[in-house]
Image (tube, rainbow, N blue to C red):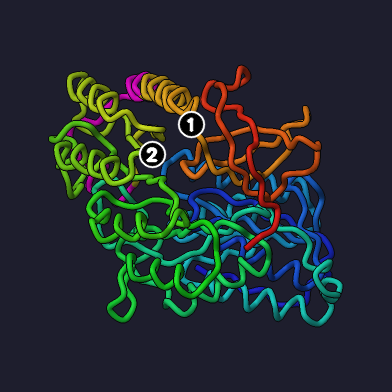
Amino acid sequence: MTTRLSAPLPVRRAVIANLGCKVNQAEMDAVERLLRARGVDVLDPRERADLVVVNTCTVTGIADRKSRQAVRRARRNNPAARVLVTGCSAAVDPEALAAADPAASIFDNESKGELLAELAALLEPSGGRPMTGPAGMGGSVDRTRAFVKIEDGCSFHCTYCIIPRARGPARSVAAVAVLADVERAVAAGHREIVLTGINAGTYSDAGLGLPGLVRRILAETTVERIRLSSIEPQHVTDELLAVWVDSGGRCLPHFHIPLQSGDDTILRRMGRRYDTASYAALAARVRRTMPAAAVHADVIAGFPGEDDAAWARTLAFLRSLELAGVHVFRYSARPGTPAARMVGQVDSGTKKRRAAEGLALAAAARASFAARQVGREANVLFERPLGDGRWLGHAATHLLVSAAASDGASLENAIGLVRVEAVDPAAADRVVGRLLEVDRRPG
C-alpha cells in the first residue's frame, strides 16, 4: 500500500521518528540528508514541525503497538503537519497505521526508495530554504558515526520472524554504491561507519561477499573505524575474521551474533541454522583470533515449546559464554508465521518472568565485561558531554567509556587512547579512564 503525495510542501521544520533496527536508521539518515540539503531544520521529535516522517517496526507485537502510537503522537503533536509513514509495519499492516491517522501518507518498504525522490520533488519548488553550503546541511543525528546499508531483506524464514514478509528476499546494495556512501560519510566528518543489513552476512555483489566488500572499503576509502551491526553465526567465517585481524585496527572487535535460544530443541523449532555447540565454538574462535573482542547476543524468552528446563538451559548457556552483552526479547506471535500456529504457546506471565530473568543476566554480563576492562587501554570515539567535564564515547568493543581532556576542551568526534581506571560508580556497565592520547581530526 502506497499513498502518494500530491502537492508541494511548505516545509521549514521536520521531525523523524525512527523505530526498529539499524537498517531503519540508515534509511532515515538518507531522509535526513535530503531534508537538510533542502535547508529544512530537522528537530527533536518532541518539537513542532511541518513534516513528520515515521519509520515503523514490526519485529514484535510491542513494536507494532509502538509504531501505531508514534503515528498517533505525530498527529497529536503536529495537527497541521504532513505525516509520512513507512517501514516494516507499514508493509505488513498498513490499514492499522492508516486507522491511527487517516490523513497520513503510507509508503511500504518496496516504495521506501521512491519516498526520497518524491520528497525531493515536493520540496524543490517551494519547500525549505536553499542550501547555502556546509552550514545549510547542519549536523546529523549522530555526528560521530554513520550507518551504511549494504543489504536488505532475508531469505532464511525463521519460524518466528515476519521480516521476510515485510522486507522481502535478501538482496545486496551494489559495492560501488556502498563505497560512495562510505566516502560521503567520511567527507561529512564521520569517523566510524556501521555496516547494516537485515541479513548482512549474505552480502553478494558480482561474486563479492562480505569479506571482499570490507576489503574494498579498507583499500578504497580512508574511514577509520568499521563496525558490523549484526551478523548470523554461520556467516562469521575464518575469511571474515582474517579481514578483521589484517585491518590494522580499522575493523572493530565487536560482534553482535544472534543466538535466540540456548536449547537445541528450541533452536530447531525456531528454524535456526546452528546448534549450541557450534555457537560456543564460534565464540571461542572469535576470542582466540581476537582476544579483546566483545561478543553480544540476542535471546528470545518464551518461544512455543520452551518449558522451564529449556529456559534454564538457555540461561546456563548464556552464562557459560561470558558475553559482553545480551539483548532480550519476549516472544511475540506474528500472524502468518509458523511459530504462531505451534502447540505449546507460553503464557504471558511466564514470558514476562523469563524476560526479567534474561534482562538481569544481561545486566550482569555487561557489568562483568566492564569490570574486566579495568587496567586495559581502549580506543574511544567520543560522542557527547556528561556535564561534569567528562565526555562519553564507545570503545572499539562498543563499551561505553568516559574521560576528560586535560585542558577541558571538547572531545566531540575525537578518537582517544584511554587507560581504563575504574567502573563508573554511576553505571556498572560503563567505565571511566584517563586520556593518554587524542586525535581530534577526522581521517
For label 1, the residue is: 376
Q: Quadrant of residue 126?
A: bottom right
Which residue is depicted at the point 28% across and 46% down? 289
Residue 421: x and y, percent?
57, 24
| 111 displayed left or right of 289 | right
Q: Nearer the viewer, residue 238 or 230?
A: 238
Q: Residue furthest front?
A: 436
Q: Quadrant of residue 340?
A: top left
Whether pointer 2 and pointer 1 mark residues with C-beta atoms closer than 8 Å, the reply is yes
Q: Nearer the viewer, mark 2 or mark 1?
A: 1
1 up-or-down from 174: above or below = above
Quadrant of the rendering where the C terminus is positioned: bottom right
314 up-or-down from 161: above or below = above
| 341 displayed left or right of 92 | left
Under circle 2, the secondary element is: loop
Please state which amino acid type lies under the numbered disc 2: Ala
Q: Nearer the viewer, residue 16 or 236?
A: 236
Which class describes the residues within 10 Å of circle 2: few (<14), some (14-19), or many (20+)? Answer: some
Which residue is depicted at the point 68% across and 51% down? 413
Q: What's the distance in space between the residues labelled 2 and 1, CA to CA? A: 10 Å
Residue 235: x and y, percent?
26, 56
For label 2, the residue is: 292
Q: Nearer the viewer, residue 103 or 132?
A: 132
Residue 146: x and y, percent?
58, 59
Please state which amino acid type lies under the numbered disc 1: Arg
Residue 342 covered by magenta stretch: yes
Which residue is depicted at the point 27% across and 27% down? 346
| 272 displayed left or right of 60 | left
Which residue is depicted at the point 35% across and 32% down? 323
Residue 234 covered by magenta stretch: no
Any part of residue 308 in sight: yes
Q: Which residues are magenta?
A: 335-354
